[in-house]
Amino acid sequence: MDKCDMSSPAAKATSSSSHRYPSWVMLDRNTRLNYPRSTLDYPKDLFRLTIADAETSEGDPIRVAFRAVPPPGASRIYARWTPSNEERRRTQENPSYRVEPLVVTADGNVILLQLALHFDFETTRSDFYIYTVDSDGRPPSLRRFPTCVHEMAVDGLYYSRLEHMLRLTDIGLICRGDGEFVVADLQLRPEDDDVDGAPLEAQLCMLSERPELRYVRLPVRIPSGNPADRELGTRGCPHAFRNVCATEGGAVVRFVEVLTTTVFVSGCNSPVSSSFAINLWKLVTATLTWEKENTMEEAELWNLQGYGDLPRVEPESPVVSMEEPNVVYLVLDNKGDGRGGPDDVIIDDTRIIVVDMLNKTLRSWFKYTKVNPSQEEDGNMASRNLAGSEAFILCEFSKYLHVPQTSR
């Protein structure tokens, strides 16, 4: 079974003179801020071609660049920014407040970034940036997104300023071609007749050709009561076990989930039994309904040829390949915290497996390094996502990068 690390062919391809950008990538949500250039194992000329500059809302220069690694390697954004104001710089450099820019979402040739500005130890404001590349060879661009504040009536008596784009998980991006894109922020406001404690529905919001919103319920079980209650057999962080992915050039939406059934006995801290299944669904746009395409039970996965001694744990952070809709990438995590010992040795046992759900095969697996915020690991198979049980952001950004003739 293939195993990929920094000495693998996939890793060496990024430093080859015959470099080719992958058609799609798995993008790490966490950027590298002010990372030492001398440690970058990447062709410098290709790296320079992705550089774009802008200014923060405080007038400080900020620069970003992109590093593309074939899946399942971690592609990432590098940023250079230092606040000019001494007090704000001290706040930003404080380990408790130092926050790298984050990748919010991506679509086509556009990536949406967030930069948190700390004015003191209590006040924070965010800048948002649109990072764009074009396949025609024009230089990449970085533009700061305007602040969006909406005036709304409250109880019909007075107006309040409602600042948008506060929750990154509620922000979406759609590219329409020819340089046009739409950034949408979903905000839920309770109605007067809402009943406290009523169960919420899991829904997917779609923007049609006409300016209207349509809601499609996800094919998941809706827990009643407290979703974090262990005795209910539910999970407190469903984002770690499900994902909505655009496949086949963005034409088809698929939903992948790792559904766990856990049985608890009252008074016991450990479950009596637990099992999982990987389910892959396809959204039928004509009827706005979900069609289950494939499923794989726990025993099926563990008995696949090549699984061998891989961790027999519940997979996390599932994503669907953008090119092969029957192929899913899953994380196997033995729950090491990724923190180093006295010599800063990174300790974890994390793998990413590539599973063909249609043909019931394990294509390959890869050892991954789970990086915590204090580490400066920059390997192709290293990610901050995994420390927070977050899935990668899939995008075709790399497909639009222009490779100069001298690097081909």
Image (tube, rainbow, N blue to C red):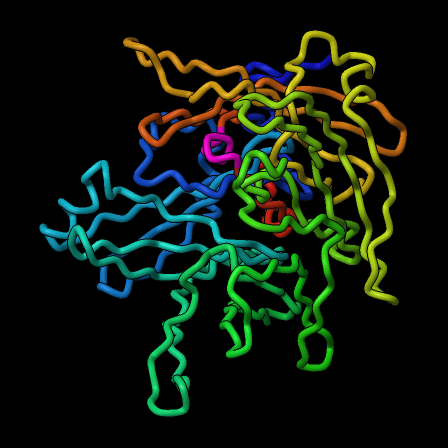
Q: What count of labels does the image hold?
A: 0
Q: Identify which residue is drawn at 68% across, 50% down.
A: 244
Q: Residue furthest front?
A: 267
Q: Is residue 265 left or right of residue 250?
A: left
> Is residue 404 in view from this perspective?
no
Residue 159 image point, x, y percent: 34, 87
Residue 94 image point, x, y percent: 18, 39
Q: Nearer the viewer, residue 9 or 3?
A: 3
> Is residue 336 in view from this perspective?
yes
Q: Nearer the viewer, residue 44 or 202?
A: 202
Asked if 29 appears above or below 105 in the picture, the reply is: above
Quadrant in which the N terminus appears: top right
Quadrant in which the C terminus appears: top right
Q: Identify which residue is drawn at 13% across, 45% down.
A: 90
Residue 212 image point, x, y percent: 68, 79
Residue 79 image point, x, y percent: 36, 45
Q: Is residue 246 left or right of residue 62?
A: right
| 385 drawn magenta | yes
Asked if 107 appears above or below 33 in the picture, the reply is: below
Q: Nearer the viewer, residue 32 or 287?
A: 287
| 4 drawn magenta | no
Q: Identify which residue is drawn at 79% across, 42% down.
A: 280
Q: Residue furthest bottom?
A: 157
Asked if 340 appears above or below 246 in the picture, the reply is: above
Instruction: Give the magenta range.
Output: 383-389
Asked if 312 appears above or below 212 in the picture, the reply is: above
Q: Residue furthest left?
A: 86
